[in-house]
Image (tube, rainbow, N blue to C red):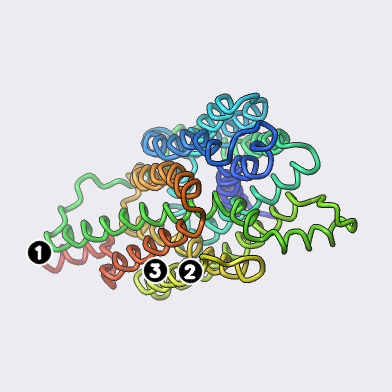
Amino acid sequence: MLNRDQAHFLLLNVGHFLDHLFTLIFATVAALALHREWGVGYAALLAYATPGFFAFGLFSLPAGWLADKWSRDSMMVVFFIGIGLASIATGFANSPLQIGVGLFVIGMFAAIYHPVGLAIVTMKWRNTGMRIATNGVWGNLGVACAALITGYLIDNGGWRLAFYLPGVVSIGFGLAYWALQRDVISLDRNPDKSAAKPDEAPASASHRSLLIRVSVIVFVTTAVSSIIFQSTTFALPKIFDERLQGLVADVAALWSGTGDGAYVATVLGSLTFLVFAVASGAQLIVGSLLDRFGPRRVFMVLATMQLVFFALMPGLNDGIAFAVALGFMLGAFGQIPINDYMIGKMASGAHRARIYGIRYVVAFSVLAATLPLVAYVYQNWGFDTLFQILAAAAFVILCAVSLLPKVLPTPQLQETTTKATA
């Protein structure tokens, strides 16, 4: 039986799972169903997902500000119920424009989770690296299950059910979150507001310089890694649809026992899920290493891994393509908690949700801008050119991370430096 603290962390993790699941349902629906049912090309369908990802980023900052000013737990209830209702409404779409509007509203509510949920995780519990990593694994399993669940529902109930069912589940979890935290919510305030220290001593020039340097690196790597994350997670179902045809046909034949092409969407979703699920486990290792060795060395290893595997991917098919895709996804997923870890260490509690909000405005705005890039590159040159672009992006991350200091400029370090120079 879970105690209240454990139940709270579990619900926050479930929220991260649902957040990423909702934002990627359309990726599989577009790749495996809508382009056939509506007669709209895959590249054209991507345009209707772009506003949703802009909303995912744009509304992160006001969500973080409102959480700091009002109540983070109340915002989590709004997240669960709001995104559930938006998903159900999107399932009723009858045109690309209608589904685009639905995805925009889903993006608005999806924007709440990262600045609010991560602020709660980094503020309430110790062992920050492992907590963020565990929370990140749940988010990545949401990415993975979007392909798995959607593929299964396409084969067994239609694409609309892929929006309806998660929506109902999310509303249920929203009610559970409210029931668990209703006494905190009734206070209509954040428990750490009283801990703010407006009269803290100003930082020394060296500390400010170090803080600016790390902040620039955080936001540069956030932007570039978002290109990699969006390109791989959104396009992987389509990449597998093209590159794993032999493997998918063999597995589908074994699955159905008839060899008539049934269950192709389910098999594609399952293979995508397998890659994402295995790759998400890298975050647990990364979380442990962050607490032991700090972000610089860990980040450099992951950036190198991405560079190597993206460079290997062009021209590959079937089993070897599946193995190499697993390699670059291990790097892409493994690096996700690192910037959140650094922000959690450097930011003061009273403003943490807003700072996470700024980080995710950058991240998800780049996510949105990446979709037209993927569509343009795919339509004109195919996925091999995309892999070459992503290898160059991984090299940029590697160069930026090499400039990180060995010790982060935390508030504790500022206090120590101030006392030493007083």
Marker disc for residue 286:
2
Sequence-first tag of 1 and 3: 3
Q: CA distance from mark 1 to mark 2?
A: 37 Å
Is residue 275 in sight in this rendering? yes
Mark 1 burial class by Cα count in 10 Å: few <14, some 14-19, many 20+: few
**Which of these two is toward me, 259 or 172?**
259
249 relative to 42 in the view: left or right: right
Binning the other alpha carbons within 10 Å of mark 3 as few (below 14), some (14 to 19) or many (20 upward) gives many
Judged from the image, the secondary structure of the residue bearing numbered disc 1 is loop
Residue named by callout 1 = 422
Amino acid at pointer 1: Ala
Q: Nearer the viewer, residue 409 or 148?
A: 148
Dot 1 or dot 2: first in sequence order is: 2
Q: Which residue is mark 3?
A: 299
Circle nearer the viewer, 1 or 3: 3
Q: Is the N terminus in the top left, top right, bottom left or bottom right quadrant?
A: bottom right
- Do the residues under discs 1 and 2 have CB atoms within 8 angstroms? no
> Where on the picture, by quarter, is residue 320?
bottom right
Residue 8, x across and y down, in percent: 58, 48
Disc 1 + disc 3, Cβ < 8 Å: no
Which secondary structure lies at badge 3?
helix
Mark 2 falls on what kind of element?
A: helix
Q: Is residue 115 visible?
A: no
How packed mark 2 is, by other alpha carbons closer than 10 Å (few <14, some 14-19, many 20 or more), is many
Residue 47 versus residue 225 in the image, above or below: above
Q: Quadrant of the C terminus?
A: bottom left
Q: Is residue 202 above or below residue 407?
A: above
- The CA distance from mark 3 to mark 2 is 9 Å
